[in-house]
Image: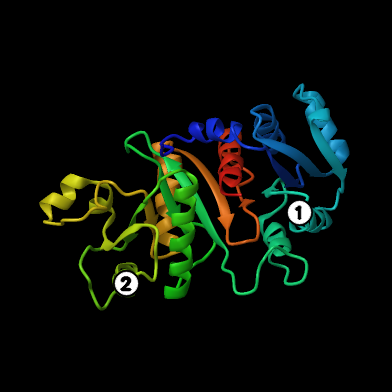
Amino acid sequence: MAITKLDQMLDALRSKPKKKLVAVAANDEHTIEAVKDAVNAGIVEAILVGDETKIIEICNKDSIDPGIFTIINEPNESVAATKAVAMVRDGMGDVLMKGSLSTDKYMKAILNKELGLMAPGSILTHVAVIENPKYHKLMVVGDVAVIPAPDLKEKTAILNYLINTAKALQIETPKVAIITASEQVLPKLQACVDAALLSKMADRGQITGAIIDGPLALDVAIDKESAAIKGLNSQVTGEVDCLLFPNIEAGNVFYKCMTKIVGCEVGAIVAGAKKPCVLSSRGDSVKTKLYSIALAAMTA
């Protein structure tokens, strides 16, 4: 049965072998508390790579038993990132997680050509899963944080990662909308042209595992009534599982409207590396970080 609420990921993971999580620079309360919740939920075993003194201080302050973690002392954030990536690359971990270090240091360690987590030719992208109380299922969206202006090759890669993530959430045949400003094929808008090409590639079997339609404006993608008024007959409209955005501006604005204005719950990962990587903001809530850990474990 398809997962329709983020909490359901925790239930699904409890019946599976625990994943090994390696958290980089786990020197902040939100990261430690989220990892503690994931450990207590029975979904991961955790290794914290960071400043051991700070980690112990936070654990003592928040009444967390540091014995539930394996702690590797490395106060230098860049060195901690390199060590954590090496552990995941060498099979000692299934999931990498960002703690209090900056995104550029985290990504630099992942993208290191010799010591990182990238396979030759692979494309790194951000995948978020949003639970909106006004929509009847989860929305798997991308890219909202990593690739600024994806070309057709990058959009194809993002599309496949969205589909794979949806399938990890037990959605057997995801319905995918390729979002643009219009549901018409407008030659002067490259996003519309790309959407039409991707839809035809799916029709021809070049992209598989999902029902794909585009170009679609956001209103018709998520609202069946809007699609009916505009005369669209599609299996995707009103039932969409995945949204592929034309660029980072569109995706990021949608993501932040969902989280900051609507108050949606979310989990997010970076896909495309050899192992899933949690890339939550340092300001994200404990619950967001927990759901991101669960999403990474689902896709690992």
Task: Give the left or right position of residue 155, taking residue 61 as reference.
Answer: left
Residue in front for this viewpoint, 19 or 241: 19
Determine which residue is flagged by label 2.
Answer: 204
Q: Quadrant of the N terminus?
A: top left
Q: Amino acid at mark 1?
A: Gly
Q: Please tell me in which quadrant of the rendered image residue 183 appears.
A: bottom left
* Residue for point 24% across, 63% down: 182
Q: Which residue is at 75% across, 58% downward?
A: 89
Colour scheme in use:
rainbow
For the residue pair 283 and 42, the one nearer the viewer reads as 42
CA neighbours of label 2 inside 10 A, class few (<14), some (14 to 19), many (20+): few
CB under 8 Å between callouts 2 and 1? Answer: no
- What is the number of the mark on residue 91? 1
* Residue with the most extreme top position: 63
Residue at left offset 72%, top offset 51%: 101
- Estimate the x, y position of residue 66 in percent, counting from the top left: 82, 29
Q: Position of residue 24 (x, y in %)?
A: 75, 48
Q: Earlier in the sequence, mark 2 or mark 1?
A: 1
Q: In the picture shown, does residue 204 fall above or below 92?
A: below
Vertical arrangement, residue 173 with respect to residue 45, above or below = below
